[in-house]
Image (cartoon, coloured by chain):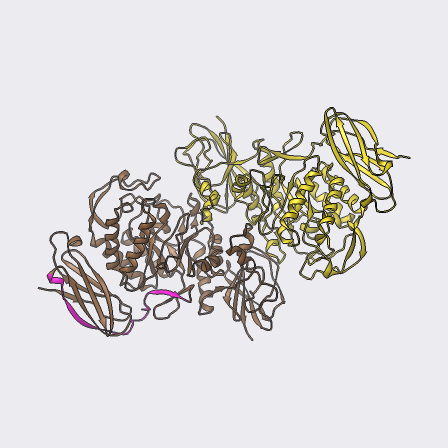
Chain colours: A brown, B yellow
Amino acid sequence: MLQMTTTAASLWATYELSLTGPSTGNPFLDVTLTASFRQGEREVRVNGFYDGAGVYKLRFLPDTTGAWSYETRSNAPDLDHVNGTFEVGPALPNHHGPVRVANRHHFRYADGTRYTNIGTTAYVWNLQGDALEEETLASLAAAPFTKIRMCVFPKHYRYNENEPERYPFKLVTAGKSKWDGSFAGADKYGWTFDFTQFEPTYFQHLEQRINQLAEIGVEADLIVFHPYDRWGFSRMSPAEDDRYLRYLTARLAAFPNVWWSMANEYDLMPQKTPQDWDRFINITADNDPFGHLLSVHNCFKFYDHNHPRITHASIQRSSANLSAVWREKYGKPVSIDECCYEGTIAELWGNISGQKMVRRFWDGVVNGGYVTHGETFNNDTNTIWWAKGGKLIGDSVARIAFLRRIMEAGPDEGLDPIKSTGAYRIAMQGGLDNVVLQQLFVPPAGEEGWAPAMAWWPTAGQPHRYYLSYLGENQPSEATVAVPPDEHYSATLIDTWNMTETPLAPSVKRGDVLHFEPKPYLALLFKRID
Amino acid sequence: MLQMTTTAASLWATYELSLTGPSTGNPFLDVTLTASFRQGEREVRVNGFYDGAGVYKLRFLPDTTGAWSYETRSNAPDLDHVNGTFEVGPALPNHHGPVRVANRHHFRYADGTRYTNIGTTAYVWNLQGDALEEETLASLAAAPFTKIRMCVFPKHYRYNENEPERYPFKLVTAGKSKWDGSFAGADKYGWTFDFTQFEPTYFQHLEQRINQLAEIGVEADLIVFHPYDRWGFSRMSPAEDDRYLRYLTARLAAFPNVWWSMANEYDLMPQKTPQDWDRFINITADNDPFGHLLSVHNCFKFYDHNHPRITHASIQRSSANLSAVWREKYGKPVSIDECCYEGTIAELWGNISGQKMVRRFWDGVVNGGYVTHGETFNNDTNTIWWAKGGKLIGDSVARIAFLRRIMEAGPDEGLDPIKSTGAYRIAMQGGLDNVVLQQLFVPPAGEEGWAPAMAWWPTAGQPHRYYLSYLGENQPSEATVAVPPDEHYSATLIDTWNMTETPLAPSVKRGDVLHFEPKPYLALLFKRID
């Protein structure tokens, strides 16, 4: 006899059907389950999944209010042809739906609300036990971050020797935990798992944490594969990888705040071929009827972000000032999702200063991109934010919050780089050996309508309305205003490190010279007054 | 009747013959004069030049002691078949001859003395009147610089509106001096000169200043052409350019401390073709029997430093950490001759901090290159070191002196980057989108003999003897020693900004972990003890 439960239905909230079905054999392999959700002419097809103990689930993310119906299909008679209707109510407070690309290079929630992409990184914060995980959630609730980069699988690396409480697959043989400088996979470390049997409790815990992120307005940029592995999860067979992807998408595609990051450092996984990555992207997108953001993150070599199902360029690079070039190259939003971490650990990528982190954020923003944060301060317990979460102690967080406020007080369309026809074109053509000018958008003489606020500094904004120029570590004592002719702007000096905004002049025009104390990390903001 | 005078002859000192000859007509065009200097089977042919007032000169730079003879050829009977012998004595103190390439990527004086290439920039310091020029010489005498980048021609640019006391050619019509934002040449500014008539006093003054540089151990990296021009010197005809080159080389090739920098920012001179630059290089080298260093400096796009007569890669770029890549690309020494200037002027390239300048010096050095300094502090008289010389006031000079002492206390062969087979090879192949690793020389596991002092940091030295690692703005709290197995080294912590050297351990071996206070601008020096 069918036992069925459902959750309450509201716009942009995950709607879940729970059914009971076969619990003998291996339901993960043996039982197929899908459902069609219908409203008028629309049909949305979702995959069900086995959640253990004879429970099967189907999840749907409604994008309209009103009556929807559903009907299941399964090779298990108990699960086949189950149908019903439900009423989708209006969105609950702070429910805005999935984040999508907007204005080609920016983001909005599905309901049109602006989304400012300000990420942080805590790869396996959700596998550290309740006490630390709750501390991480409290840290995030007080922080400026609107996205967290996190892994589905546990992580093997220096500072990451602790075993998770649960595994995503059924454990057969436990192996070694000690980091020996390599991520050689299960052969070397002695772990074996039954990859035909998922552990639902592992994924239930992940889902709990993702829901808690949603409550505090944080998107989960979920890393599907990664190389930092002692258990063998990075070296499954293609059939095992694909089954995992179908299971993961069946469970999570109806969560509003999930993004798919197909890999962290895909190019550190030589066991995966280019064909594998293409197939992973397609399986994920095919099985996600709700159109979540999808990307592939690199170590050395960018993935080809022109792939039609990649929604935005997720980039690792120790500088962010080429965002404007990558925006044009890929025609998509640019998210510098790894630019080194603020901290003091030995590794090169884990010991930049707070100043440097903040500089990279600003470099990205005034070149029309977005940047992701992380912290790697050495400590005796190896509780490092970048992997495990915990407390945020770095100097950059407050400055990133200051930047977020400036961004959100700026044009609703987002900040687009103010383009030139000079150095910019040369940079695009790859003909620029002298990188000093790669960050420049030099105004061509006499050309109007797009002129930056100042000739020398990378500038973003919206033409004729708003120009934000960032001076970085340069320390001029003067700047010549280069707004379009016959327009007047207020001029504000921003100290991006000391978090001050100082009016420089109530009304400036093209050619006016502004004087100020030379120091690093200044920005100049010009807002149109007439 | 022939009047002839000669100077005393000693090794590596300019030996000069002065002859009197025709002073009617235009001797610059009408009179040819060459001489052959012979010692045994050797014959060195030099060009003479007209020095005004009926005086003709021939200059020779002896590279061996003992008896040399000479004999002239001229189309003027008074100057033809003049001959004589002279005895070249031993070198005077501090006379070491021209600087030449040594060990493929480094420099030595012709007598084998090590030369450490530490440049500064004062483009037209020699055209500022005696008071300021003598102040500049005094500044240089107290500074660490062994090279100055300076122009033959005067300079037209912002902050450079003062007219020189003399011109290199005979003035016909004076024009305007005011900088209007462009270097459009004589047409716009209204100057005309007779390019068939050199002004010997202009060059005599230049030579006096070059000789004074030699006295304080400074090489003159002489910029032959540049675009910053209101007088028309950048827009002469090919025939006028070539005559100028022959005159300049006839006058200066026998000076021990001259280098030929064919251009500053050759790519900002659209009026010169690639064929022009190739011809300029060949004319200069053909007419320099003493083999001075020769280079071409860029703005946006590097000149092709593979040109067989270019001796070293003179590079403008706002970072120096790819020196190791360029060394390999060109097989020549790398000199980052412009990496922005320490100062506070409005222009992007003229307002980096002292910290940044020092960082670029170290980045260059630990990647096997050399870096050139400059200062651009705003002041009311526009007396800016970068153009006019004067006083050095920046914070970087003392730190550059500190670095020079470290370099000169290091291996006599110079510092070569310690190579890897990983990121380095990828960078060489251009396949590296993530620039963080371009500065890395990661040791391949198990490979010996070239292992760097530390895995994460750019390191230069001499294998098995000396490793200097620079941590830049990174701030780790620990570092793992990665010297070759079974070797012992002393370990010293260098604070490159505070100019301290602190012993960390008298003897360390591979795998030892060093701990220290995290802060920016540290270096680690490992010297072999057994």
| Residue A405 locus on image (x, y percent) | 45, 65
Specify start and end residues of the magenta stretch as a single range.
A77-102
- Position of residue A6 relative to residue B427, above or below, is below
Q: Which residue is drawn at 67% across and 37% down?
A: B292
Q: In this view, does A380 lie to the left or right of A453?
A: left
Q: In x, y percent, where is residue B131?
A: 77, 48
Q: Quick one: which residue is furthest to the right in this view?
A: B1
The tally of labels here is 0
Seen as rendered, the residue at the extreme left is A1
Q: Can you name the residue that lies furthest to the front here?
A: B75
Across and down, in percent, residue B263 comes to 66, 47
In the figure, is residue A63 to the left or right of A503? left
The answer to whether residue B71 is magenta is: no
Q: Quadrant of the N terminus of chain B?
A: top right
Q: Nearer the viewer, residue B273 or A348?
A: B273
Q: Is residue B515 visible?
A: yes
Foreground residue among B17 and B338 = B17
Answer with the quarter of the image where residue A261 lies.
bottom left
Residue A87 on the magenta span? yes
Q: Could you say which is closer to the camera, residue B144 or residue B210? A: B210
Q: Position of residue B194 (x, y in %)?
A: 79, 52
The answer to whether residue B61 shows anywhere in this view is no
